[in-house]
Image (tube, grey):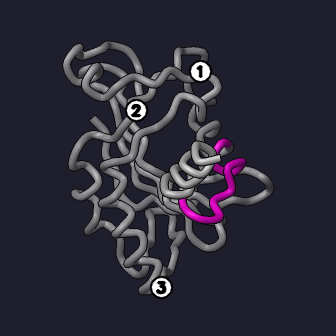
Amino acid sequence: MKLFLIIAFSFFIQFGHGQDTLKLYALIDTFSNRANGNEFIISESMWPGEMKRLKGALKPKIVDNSGDSILLTNDELTYLNAQLELTDHFHWEQRLFKNAKIIPFDTLRHQRLYGQYWFFSKPIFIRDNSICLLYYIFYCGHTCGHSQLAFYRWRNNKWTKCIHVTGGKS
């Protein structure tokens, strides 16, 4: 019983109270489908310090290039910024990814693996898990890759990107 409580509490801490696990799987599957037949390789953690750099990107009203916007309450903004800092210590678990290979961050950094691989932040859910903030970095070689901080909306039993906050390409 004690072990069960420890595991349950760990899951609660990692994904937050009331997080819908099926929605988390669906969010991850959104990206695994982009592997296009290649092995889907994911770093177990985000690049250290990367999330703190993004903290200033969130504003009460965010309008992306397409004209779509999201208006965040003060409480949501405070919560999202606090969670962005905490995600530096988040580690993905293999059990969450059906068709992916989780590789320790240090392995990716020190062995300079070639090929395609991803870094994902901890998803941050708001508004009854109907909106998610996620940051990712995708590498496809020494001179190829992109990153993106974006809001995703849960509609029709799937996640779709709704607001691009910031990102870049190399």
Tag 1 residue: 36
Q: Earlier in the sequence, mark 1 or mark 3?
A: 1
Q: Which residues are magenta?
A: 16-25
Give percent across and percent down for residue 14: 49, 52
Answer few, some or many: residues within 10 Å of disc 2's Cα (few below 14, many 20 plus, some between 14 and 19).
Answer: many
Q: Is residue 55 left or right of residue 127?
A: left
- Nearer-the-camera pick, 148 or 100: 100
SS for tag 2? loop
Disc 2 to disc 1, how far (Cα)? 21 Å
Q: Quadrant of the C terminus?
A: top left
- The residue that appears at 50% across and 81% down in the rendered structure is 71
Q: Is residue 25 left or right of residue 149?
A: right
The three-letter amino acid code for the residue at tag 1 is Asn
What is the CA distance from the residue labelled 3 to the residue labelled 2?
31 Å
Q: Describe residue 60's horizontal placement relative to residue 28 as left or right.
A: left
Q: Is residue 22 magenta?
A: yes
Query: What residue type is disc 2 on?
Result: Glu
CA gap, disc 1 and disc 3:
38 Å
From the image, tell me which residue sits under label 2: 44
Question: Residue 85, how many percent across, how many down?
Answer: 30, 60
